[in-house]
Amino acid sequence: MIRILLTVLAIGLATQPLAETRVPASQSEIALGFAPVVKRSAPAVVNIYAKIITEGRANPLFSDPFFRDFFGGRAAPRPQVRNSLGSGVILSPDGFVVSNYHVVGMASEIRVVTTDRREFDATVVLADEETDIAILKLAEARDLPHLNLRDSDHVEVGELALAIGNPFGVGQTVSSGIVSGLARTGTATGNARGYFIQTDAAINPGNSGGALIDVNGDLIGINTSILTRSGGSNGIGFAVPANLVAEFLRQAQAGNPEFVRPWAGMTGQSMTADIAESLGLDPPMGFVVADLHKLSPFAAAGFRAGDVITHMDGQEVNSPPEMMFRMSVAGIGGSSVVTRIRDGRAEEAEVSMIAAPDEPPAQRTMLDDGTILPGLVLARANPAVIADLGLPISAEGVVVVDPGRYGARAGLRRGDQIAAVNGAAIEAPADAEALLRDPGRWLQLDVLRQGKRLSLRFRL
């Protein structure tokens, strides 16, 4: 077993682009281990120190007007400062660095320290909570060591992998393992939801945002989260694949203020054995299209409910999160070849990768002080609004973009659809604005929330 393991370790020492498996040729090769790979790669992994200001929790006694008036201004919760420790990976000589959103996304101050003890101020130039990825730009950086991004679609289960980061703040640390799984969805903890590489290389708090590299020193993923009961590594860690990181870097370098992913405009259901049997699919694969928005690029390409999508750009897709990952990697502006099965026949269709269209115009409206709910922001539901608020693709009518201070007190939430005000149907934000200027002695809001109809009634 020792000889077999050392044979695999020697792969990292080979000079060929595709290393070959062979028996170590000398005692020096046996002794080197991963050292050459680490020496090349570790300088591109940095420590990140972030200061995050959060709102303090109010004492429940201060909800009583007596105590609130008695203590005056001291009743208000004070901001709290939280220090966050994590890791990052330098992606370009001029100082673009990738880390996790949960490390730097809400930070007011960020300090980045390299392995040679240089320190840089950094700013977040692109961040996305859903994928838990953030791109930083180091101030006045040049000629920095950086890692090459590998095509993560070619990563295979069983490959050796190294995790580099700053666990528990002890200093830069390297742990080894293998790629344990691919296309993991819905299993990671934290903010991230989507598609991950799984590894058993030890990942602990502080490793977040660090590098997962192969034996050639190329970046295959950004360590993001773990499954654990103790808080430490149990050998189940997750990394965002390098291909998605590459798209984040491209958009950051292009100056995008926020990450833009293509809009599918459809919903789907993962394939089950029962569904596959009813469709005559053996083995079960892909996912079933359940519904499409009339403006969906998939609808424009001829897709319809009941189609089974199996591949995108030659890569298998077996769930909606996998599909969204593939679309995010493809980026805005081009097109992708999508394979579908209909009536037992496989066929390909070219689908445009577009942002969610703002059609018809959203007519975003903020209510002023002349209304009963000043600060309430309303919009007409359209694909752009649906994507922004995470609403069902069938959503329509007028929706709440921001309830504002008074709207929140009235019980409104972001994403609520306002169907009627005092019994009058609402078709546009202007309708609600007019009715809320002089509602009378009573205010009744008929609201649709997550498929349920609510009635909010108040005496004014």
Image (cartoon, rainbow, N blue to C red):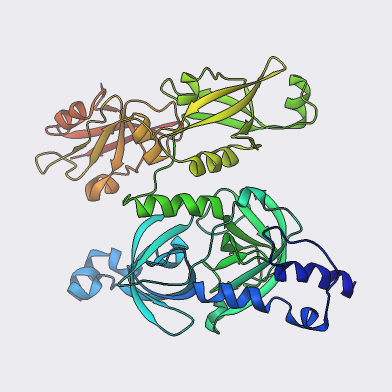
Q: As rendered, which of 12 and 155 lies closer to the eye?
A: 12
Splitting the image into 4 quarters, where does residue 140 fall?
bottom left
Which residue is at the far top? 343
Answer above or below: position of 206 versus 293: below
Name the residue rendered at 46%, 84% in the picture: 116
Residue 373 in picture, x, y percent from top left: 19, 42
Name the residue rendered at 41%, 51% in the picture: 250
Locate the C terminus by quadrant.
top left
Answer above or below: position of 127 versus 54: above
Can residue 183 be seen by looking at this rendering? Answer: yes
Which residue is at the far left? 370
Residue 65 shown left or right of residue 183 in the figure: left
Q: As rendered, which of 209 and 97 lies closer to the eye?
A: 97
Residue 1 in picture, x, y percent from top left: 90, 71
Residue 171 shown left or right of residue 408 in the figure: right
Name the residue rendered at 12%, 32% in the picture: 438
Name the residue rendered at 60%, 65% in the picture: 212
Splitting the image into 4 quarters, where does residue 64 fall?
bottom left
Answer above or below: position of 139 versus 364: below
Can residue 165 be seen by looking at this rendering? Answer: no
Tell how many labels: 0
Residue 82 in picture, x, y percent from top left: 39, 75
Residue 47 in picture, x, y percent from top left: 47, 76
